[in-house]
Image: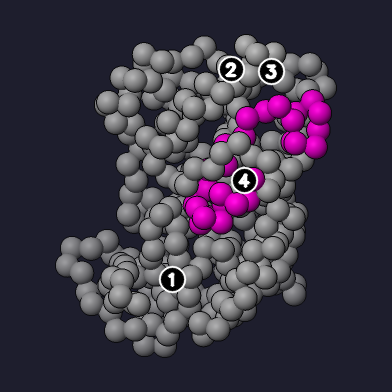
Amino acid sequence: MASILDSVDQRTKLAGHNRLELLMFHLGGKQVFGINVFKVQEVIQCPPLTRVPNAHPVVRGIANMRGKTITVMDLAMCVGKRPIDEKEAFVIITEYNRKVQGFLVSMVDRIINVNWDQIQPPPKATGKGSYMTAVTEIDSELVEIIDVEKVLAEVVGTDEEISEELSSTISEQRKEVNKILVVDDSSVARNQIKRTLDQMDYECVMAKNGAQALRMLKEWAKAGTLDDEISMIISDVEMPEMDGYTLTTEIRKDPKLAHLYILLHTSLSGVFNNAMVEQVGANRFIAKFNPDELANGVMAALDDVQRRSTAA
């Protein structure tokens, strides 16, 4: 099964062209689910698991894989479905938010190559409790793309408080700026960023994907109010309709938008993203999610924005 993830270099070439590849799988039923291949390190038959006392109910155990101890979570239970029988299951080993974890699934299907514009936000009727971050249709089947960041926030939790030391520095160096545009399809990620900016006493305006953000920017530019509305952009990379790389490319192509500071904030691989930042013309990349690192990144960005404004 590990061979399903061969030729990663070939798939990496999709980035920056508004394309992605999805690993499709099942969670004990006919419904097909998917996650971005760039998050996946390996797919293996479920190894023997060691139970962890007092662990979260969805944690099925830990396993030693390639010299690392990895927590394995039942992805079906994470999204409110029946537990998976681990005897015939597979583990998708992923890296999210700087950590490696395993997700138990009943069956792995295949990898498909799609345009981000084929990926749509989930239906409004799904509500806030949904674990879908997007949907698409493959061979007349609905594929639900799981909001893994929401799953991990509920199971593992995240520290969303800026440290006291940094908070004092921010208070001393706070700048008078306009709002910050936050672009992310995950409601969990948007709220994490908003809480960080709230602690810095900065306001933000939200967009759920790159296409929506680009429309907003063009409307402000057309009205001549762009620089009165926002001072910088914090954008995720993986988003329905238009990803963050394509958003950045489109911004740099537009003379009225090209000066905007763009900070890409994503749970994808840091090494990979640093290369893509240069390729698409973003100003900086920060891996999700560390409130101090994000706050420092915002402060550095606003310093740069003010220096350029003064020089102009």
Q: Nearer the viewer, residue 1 or 137?
A: 1
Residue type at mark 4?
Answer: Val
Question: Where residue 277 is drawn, which disc sits there?
Answer: 4
Q: Which residue is mark 1?
A: 93
Taking the view exactly as shown, the residue that stands out farthest to the front is 311
Q: Which residue is mark 2?
A: 307
Badge 1 or badge 4: first in the primary sequence: 1
Within-10-Å neighbours for mark 3: few <14, some 14–19, many 20+: some
Badge 2 or badge 1: first in the primary sequence: 1
Residue type at mark 3?
Answer: Asp
Within-10-Å neighbours for mark 4: few <14, some 14–19, many 20+: some
Number of the front mark, 1 or 4: 4
Q: Nearer the viewer, residue 310 or 98?
A: 310
Badge 1 or badge 3: first in the primary sequence: 1
Eyeballing the image, is 141 above or below 269?
below
Left or right: where 70 falls relative to 224 = left
